[in-house]
């Protein structure tokens, strides 16, 4: 199952909004096949693993390990349970169940009805972690939300006055690369109108290999000219008052809107008001805060998370505080 988890991580994030599943086929205590989920619309991990076995006769009586319960419904591809049963797999070992109502234990039951032995819950917490975006989207009906910002040693995000409308870099190049890696692992990124106006950001993954996230700008004024700052490397969309009632809590409405767009994972990169809204309304799952060792002495105060304690990791001159919202 640990190898399955490795494979699942390889498939991220091109499989989104489908989960990137890892699968290993074992016979006589040896791995004879393995696979992970293809980019969205392609084959699932189980079928890729089955197809990777050169001599298909070896599949008869083999065991199949998979991080997530096999699907049992027709979507863009046929049910994985059919492929497993038709190839005479004798034992399926599953990391965690799929909460999607179209599956939700039915995959296990179909396998059992066909005479396949099924074991559930192997490395369950590790598999739930690798599928956290998909599981959150299915169970909470909102995207998996990661907050991210950088701050000075004394808790400021930026100076009060800047010389140009470009980002004021607090974090170092290694932190920036990690941030861009995070962008490739999420479907969308959200900022506010002030961040676009003041920083003229691109919000792409130019410092890391992978696809760019879809870009969303929250603007109460609905000023479409804000989108002119972006190039054509990724899609951008304005979310304005025609979609959001700004007199009501904003983040639940944002989540509902993004669910309709089938967005299962979101990074929120600013500004401070939007970040604080997600924190105070308790609509977040992870937070990455890069803290530089230099002080600004004055400036725009950073958001504060007081409900959970962070894990700390040094990234040369930056310190990464990683918060997990275990609500």
Image (cartoon, rainbow, N blue to C red):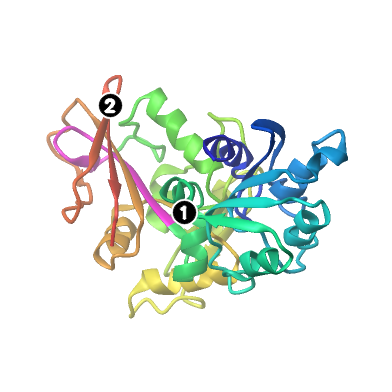
Q: Is residue 108 left or right of residue 218?
A: right
* Real-space Cα separation, disc 2 to disc 1, in angstroms: 27 Å
The quadrant of the image that shows the C terminus is bottom left
Q: Secondary structure at mark 1?
A: helix
- Number of residue marks: 2
Q: Secondary structure at mark 2?
A: strand
Which region of the structure is painted magenta? 145-161
**Residue 279's spot in the image, x, y percent?**
27, 60
Q: Quadrant of residue 315?
A: top left
**Residue 177's spot in the image, x, y percent?**
46, 29
Q: Quadrant of residue 155?
A: top left
Dot 2 or dot 1, earlier in sequence = 1
Q: Quadrant of residue 208?
A: top right
Q: What residue is shown at x 75% (from left), y 66% (from top)?
A: 75
- Up the image or down, 54 lies above or below 115; here it is above
**Residue 209's spot in the image, x, y percent?**
60, 31
Q: What residue is shown at x 49% (from left), y 36% (from top)?
A: 180
Please give the residue where the numbered disc 1 appears in the rendered image: 132
> Which of the two residues, 296 or 293, is positioned nearer the viewer here?
293
- Up the image or down, 111 lies above or below 3; here it is below
**Residue 288's spot in the image, x, y percent?**
33, 42
Q: Is 157 inside the magenta-drawn segment? A: yes
């Amino acid at each position: 199952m640990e190898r399955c988890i490795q494979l699942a991580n390889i498939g991220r994030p091109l499989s989104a909004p489908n989960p990137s599943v890892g699968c290993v086929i074992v016979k006589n205590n040896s791995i004879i096949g393995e696979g992970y989920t293809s980019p969205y619309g392609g084959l699932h991990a189980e079928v890729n693993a089955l197809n990777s076995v050169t001599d298909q006769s070896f599949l008869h009586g083999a065991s199949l390990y998979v991080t997530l319960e096999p699907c049992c419904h027709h979507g863009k591809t046929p049910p994985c349970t059919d492929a497993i049963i038709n190839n005479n797999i004798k034992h399926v070992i599953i990391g965690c169940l799929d909460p999607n109502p179209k599956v939700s234990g039915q995959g296990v039951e179909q396998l059992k009805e066909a005479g396949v032995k099924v074991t559930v819950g192997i490395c369950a917490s590790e598999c739930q972690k690798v599928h956290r975006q998909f599981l959150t989207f299915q169970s909470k009906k909102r995207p998996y939300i990661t907050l991210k910002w950088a701050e000075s040693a004394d808790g400021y995000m930026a100076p009060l006055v800047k010389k140009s409308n470009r980002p004021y870099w607090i974090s170092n190049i290694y932190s920036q690369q990690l941030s861009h890696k995070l962008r490739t692992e999420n479907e969308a990124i959200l900022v506010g109108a002030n961040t676009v106006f003041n920083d003229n950001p691109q919000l792409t993954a130019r410092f890391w290999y992978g696809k760019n996230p879809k870009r969303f700008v929250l603007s109460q004024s609905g000023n479409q000219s804000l989108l002119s700052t972006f190039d054509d490397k990724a899609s951008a969309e304005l979310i304005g008052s025609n979609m959001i009632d700004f007199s009501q809590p904003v983040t639940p409405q944002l989540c509902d809107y993004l669910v309709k767009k089938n967005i299962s994972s979101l990074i929120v990169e600013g500004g401070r008001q939007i970040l604080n809204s997600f924190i105070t309304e308790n609509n977040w799952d992870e937070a990455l805060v890069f803290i530089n060792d230099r002080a600004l002495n004055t400036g725009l105060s950073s958001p504060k998370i007081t409900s959970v304690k962070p894990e700390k990791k040094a990234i040369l001159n930056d310190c990464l505080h990683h918060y997990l919202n275990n609500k």
